[in-house]
Image (spheres, grey):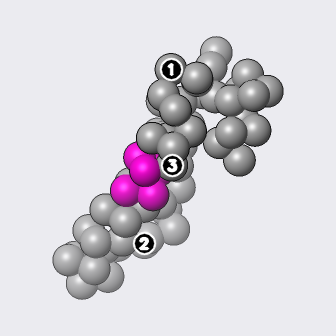
Amino acid sequence: MLIEGQQSGVFTKAISADDLTHIVMGTFRLQMYKWRMAEFQFDIEIEGNKMILAMLTLIHLK
C-alpha cells in the first residue's frame, strides 16, 4: 500500500517505502506495548486510530 501510495502521489517519496514500513510497524508495536504496560486500561482502538491519523498526516502529500 505504501508503494502504491507513493506511485500515485498520495504519500511522500522523501522517505523510502521500506523505511516507511519500519516507521509504521514500529508505531503499531509501540502502541501495543504502551497498552500492555498500562495493563490494557485504555481503549486500544481509539488510541490506535489517533496514531493512524497522525501517521497519515505526516506522510500524506497536500
Above or below residue 38? Residue 5 is above
- In reply to whether residue 4 is colored magenta, the answer given is no
- Who's the residue at 42% across and 72% down the image? 43
Q: For the residue carrying disc 2, how many other residues have a C-alpha within 10 Å: few (<14), some (14-19), or many (20+)?
A: few
* Residue 22 relative to residue 41: left or right: right
* SS state under label 1: loop
Whether residue 50 is visible here, answered yes or no, is no
Residue pointed to by mark 1 = 14
Residue pointed to by mark 2 = 43
Q: For the residue carrying disc 3, how many other residues have a C-alpha within 10 Å: few (<14), some (14-19), or many (20+)?
A: some
* SS state under label 3: helix
In front here: 28 or 46? 28
Q: Position of residue 13 (x, y in %)?
A: 58, 23
Q: Which of pointers 3 and 2 lies earlier in the amino acid sequence?
A: 3
Magenta region: 22-26
* Residue 54 relative to residue 26: left or right: right
- Who's the residue at 51% across and 49% down the image? 21
- Who's the residue at 73% across and 22% down the image? 9
Most frequent secondary structure within the magenta stretch: helix
Q: CA distance from mark 2 to mark 1?
A: 33 Å
Which disc number belongs to residue 60? none
* Circle 2: residue type: Asp
Q: Position of residue 18 (x, y in %)?
A: 51, 44
Residue pointed to by mark 3 = 21
- Who's the residue at 38% across and 54% down the image? 27
Question: Please, which residue is most extreme toward the right here?
Answer: 8
